[in-house]
Every structure is written in C-alpha cells, then in structure tokens.
Image (spheres, rainbow, N blue to C red):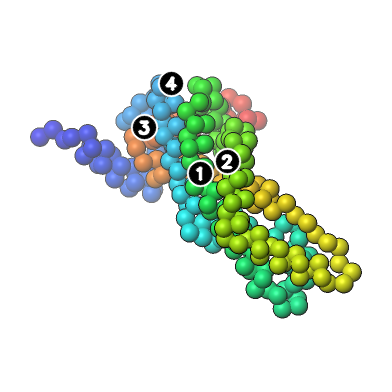
Amino acid sequence: MTMSRPYRNLLFFLGLLIFSSCQSTAQINKVIQQTLGTPNNSEIATGLKEALEKGTGVSTERLSAVDGYFKNPDVKILFPEEAKNVEKTLRSIGLGSVCDQAIESLNKAAEEAAKEAKPIFTAAIKQMTLQDVRGILLGENDAATQYFARTTIQELTKKFSPIINSSLQKVNATNYWSDVMTQYNKIPLVKPVNTDLTAYVTQKAIDGLFVEIAKEEYKIRELVTERTSPLLLKVFSYAEREKEARKKDNPGF
C-alpha cells in the first residue's frame, strides 16, 4: 500500500524527534540533507518567510493577549528611568497602589497597540528580496530581528502612537499617571518630572515586540523540533551546514 504524503511526513517527523534526542546537530543535518536534499532559491525564500510569518504571528498574539506585557517580565513596562525616583518616593510614603495602577495601565495600552503589529511585519516579509532572505538565513542569530527593526520601526511608531494615546485614556492611564505626578510634585523640594507618556509607552511596546521576535528566531535557528514542516527542516539544516562550512574555510568567521 502506498502511503500518503502527510503520513510519510508524520513518520519522518516522529523518526527525526527520536533521532534528534541522541544525535549531534551535524548528524541530524546530514540525515535531513540525504532525505530532503538541498533547497533551491525559491524554497529558501518560501521557507524563511514561512518561519518569519510564524514567529511574528506568535509574538504579536502573545503580547496582544490579556496581560501579554504586564505578566511577561522580559517586556513589562515599568516607570521611565527619569521617574524611578518618583516611584521609590511614593512607595516609601504608602502610595504604592497608585504606582501599581499606573504601571498596569501602561501595559494594557501596549497590549492594545500590539494587535496592529502583524500586518506591518507581514508587509515587511513580502517585500524581502532574495538578497535579504539569504542575508537573514545565513546571517547572525538575530538577523531577522535586526531586519524587522530596520524596516518596520517607523511604521510601527506611526501606527502605535495614536492607538496608545487613545488606549492610555481609555484605561485611565493618563489619570493614574497624573495622580502619580501630582502626588510626587507636591512633595517639598523634589524636582518636578514630566514624561511624554505616549512616546515612552510606544517605544517600550515596540521594544517588547522585538524581544519576543528574537525569542522565536532563536527557537527556529537552534531547535530542530521548532521546524514544523519538511521545508523548514530543509532550509534551516541547509543554513547550519553553510555556516559550518564557512567556519571551516574561515576559522575567524
């Protein structure tokens, strides 16, 4: 009986999972190459873009979920650096709850904006040239994250800023922040602090996106089990072989 392609793929993945648990990356890549061959330029472009679509999708969904920023210690938005003393002072005089409300509201505003990020990343992926694709695939481990930072930062800022400004008002962040600063600026002899709240939260929300994208990029580059299709296996094992070959030819690479 002839097995269907999905069934053959399933068996291949199961075999690879078992094999990868006890073999080196080089051995795994050799098996993948023997089984799937070397990708052509079209497959490289399609495979990398598939990986980036997946990674940016996961990242934006994670951060736009309820408490996506607030309960993620890697991206949680805290008081601006210039206002750290504000927080410390207010907490020391029993106004910690005011600080907590302000922090939570900043993060909720970022969550609202993150919902709009996916189409911007998708557009950046679609406009990639073959040179971009190969540069990312064979580049540094954060090459894709760097690419998105270069190509999307202006559009993200333009898109996020009005959403965050509106969200800050909707979740009462501006009121909480006003309460914080009012309470602080009433304290005798302190230097008044005035922060552009919209600009600050916009930048931190975008920074958080790149933090999460970098995590997903690391996974697809380093973990065979994250390559969830034959094409991803083929493309990223090829990338690893190419990088190893470069190191052998140029030890300082």
Is the residue 212 above or below the residue 71 in the image? above
Marks 2 & 4, CB-CB < 8 Å contact: no
Residue sitting at x 35%, y 26%: 37
Q: Kindly tell me whether residue 215 is visible in this rendering.
A: no
- Closest to the camera, between mark 2 and mark 3, is 2
Q: Position of residue 111 (x, y in %)?
A: 53, 53
Q: Work out how far the residue at label 2 is from the one at label 3, CA to CA, in angstroms.
A: 33 Å
Amino acid type, mark 4: Asn
Amino acid type, mark 3: Leu
Mark earlier in primary sequence (1, 4): 4
Q: Where is residue 40 in the image (x, y as percent from the top left)?
A: 40, 21
User: Mark 3 — residue?
Assistant: 231
Which is nearer the eye, 181 or 237? 181
Q: Position of residue 196 (x, y in %)?
A: 73, 51
Amino acid type, mark 1: Glu
User: Mark 1 — residue?
Assistant: 116
Residue sitting at x 53%, y 52%: 112
What element does badge 3 sit on?
A: helix
Q: Work out how far the residue at label 1 is from the one at label 2, CA to CA, in angstroms.
A: 7 Å
Q: Which residue lies furthest to the left in this view?
A: 1
Corner quadrant of residue 149? top right
Mark earlier in primary sequence (3, 1): 1
User: Mark 4 — residue?
Assistant: 41
Which is nearer the eye, 172 or 55? 172
User: Mark 2 — residue?
Assistant: 159
Q: Kindly tell me whether residue 225 is visible in this rendering.
A: yes
Residue sitting at x 43%, y 41%: 54
Is the residue 168 above or below the residue 48 in the image? below
Left or right of 36: which side holds 240? right
